Amino acid sequence: MTNPGRHFVAVIGGAISGSVATEILADHGIRVAVFEQNTRPYGKIEDGLPRWHVEQRKQEYARIDARMKKPNVYFIPSIKLGRDFNLSQLFEWGFSAVILANGAWRDRELGAPEAEQYVDKGLVYQNPFIYWYNHKNEKDYQGPRYETPDEAVVVGGGLASLDVVKVLQLENYERALKARGIHTSMHELEKSIPEVCKAHGIKPEELGVKGCLLIYRRREQDMPLAQPPDNATPEQIAKTEMVRQKMLRLARDKFLFRFQDRRLTTGIIVENGRLHGLKVVETKIEGRKAEPIPGSEQELRAPLVVSSIGSVPEKLSGINMNGEYYTFSGNDLPRYTALERVFGVGNVVTGQGNIRVSLVHSQKVTKRVVDCMKSDDQNAGAGAASAEQQVANAMGAIGKQIEAIPQLSDHQLAEVERQVQALQQKAGFTSDYDAWIAKVTPPDLE
Ligand SMILES: Cc1cc2nc3c(=O)[nH]c(=O)nc-3n(C[C@H](O)[C@H](O)[C@H](O)COP(=O)(O)OP(=O)(O)OC[C@H]3O[C@@H](n4cnc5c(N)ncnc54)[C@H](O)[C@@H]3O)c2cc1C
């Protein structure tokens, strides 16, 4: 254990990666303030993972709650980095270090010329679409509302795009069955649309749903639905490709959507100020390259296009970007290059939308951050250590490529604590985490 109470870390974002970092720090006696933009700290578990994952969401909420309730943890809700404070301010307040765990909330742009002008006019992005789907039945839901017409086009290929397709298909079949006087639920249909139809003595094709169309720019066996191990052999790669094809086939059997691979978006179809579909071209695949095939252009008309081609970190005022990501350097210990003692964990660094990947990444990085703190604790006690020991400590730090994070004085610690409590008070948080969660959870949240 490091010297308890001599460090105070700011963690930005309280979901999987943020709560895991928080727990590791707190278990080492380090004080942690968690700055969370929402009232609840569940991130993509609540607003990304579709709400039919009832048990999984409950379990993840409980895990996050348990981490937030650890001694030494100060939860500050409804406060957003880049809007309510910036990184430099955290150091002015006296924090020892900052861990960015704010995920990836910005949809990667579709990339077709002028497409951005038609957002919410025929074009919708995955993140707000799933947010709406997860919250739409709440009485007090105030956000945008989306239509789910039949024959929508989804641009994607990853797991999240399959969820978008599922949402559209579930909504369409629920409506079509309702029109026949058959009341079903998302939970029933999510298991298998053909099975529900069968149970009601109907053939799915009798319902007249044409189904949404998923397009992907590479081949179906290239879809990022499963990943081969690192340094995979040709056999392992072939096996992964078969797994991907099987996953797609199973999803299509259960949810009855259409699919075209090797389709690259080149333009949009606009009529009367609204997007009415996409212009696409077939592609030829060579390795990772998807080259357009001249003469294979095609129009895909659709009442709605949902783009689900990946999420990247949100651009925040005062944070430097390198392309789509913040300027982190270093794999084992991703450091924000523009400011010392700022690190990144989870989806904000990995770019991979996966709970386990976020969790493991946060564990690894946070343990390294703790090492940086221990290293300074050793330096602080160096007066008592022999010259040989001091050299050994310094060499150890260099060997592990870590920087020492200096300890805080009693006065500095008290100042940070004062600031944190003032922010909690401003947010209406009274230090009882359970009471807060009970207060801010909508009674009809699914
Ligand atoms: C449709 C969909 C389906 C998915 N399905 C699966 C699945 O089946 N299995 C799976 O493993 N993964 C799935 N995922 C991905 C998984 O949910 C995420 O990858 C994972 O939860 C990310 O965790 P994280 O903590 O890194 O980021 P996030 O969950 O994004 O957490 C970031 C936190 O930071 C907060 N925050 C953001 N910006 C700020 C700011 N500026 N200031 C303060 N706070 C901020 C957010 O509110 C949030 O609480 C899915 C994702 C989506 C979108």
Image (spheres, grey):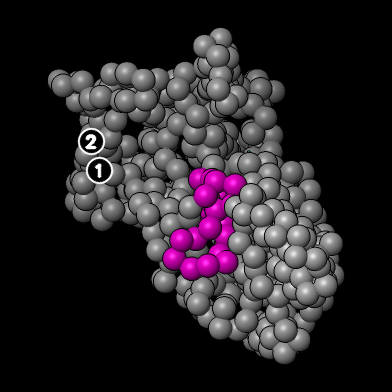
Q: Amino acid at mark 2?
A: Thr
Can I make out residue 287 in this image? yes
Q: Which mark is residue 266?
A: 2
Magenta-span inclusion, residue 332: yes
User: Which residue shows up at 33% across the image and 44% down it?
Assistant: 110
Relative to 249, does residue 72 appear above or below in the rendering?
A: below
Q: Is mark 1 within 8 Å of ligand 1?
A: no
Span of residues in magenta: 330-351
Viewer-proximal residue among 309 and 252: 309
Q: Which mark is residue 423?
A: none
Q: CA distance from mark 2 to mark 1?
A: 6 Å
Quadrant of the rendered image containing residue 235: top right
Can I make out residue 144 in this image? no
Q: Amino acid at mark 1?
A: Ala
Q: Quadrant of the C terminus?
A: bottom right
**Are dots 2 and 1 in contact, CB under 8 Å?**
yes
User: Which residue shows up at 78% across the image and 74% down it?
Assistant: 383
Quadrant of the rendered image containing residue 171: top right
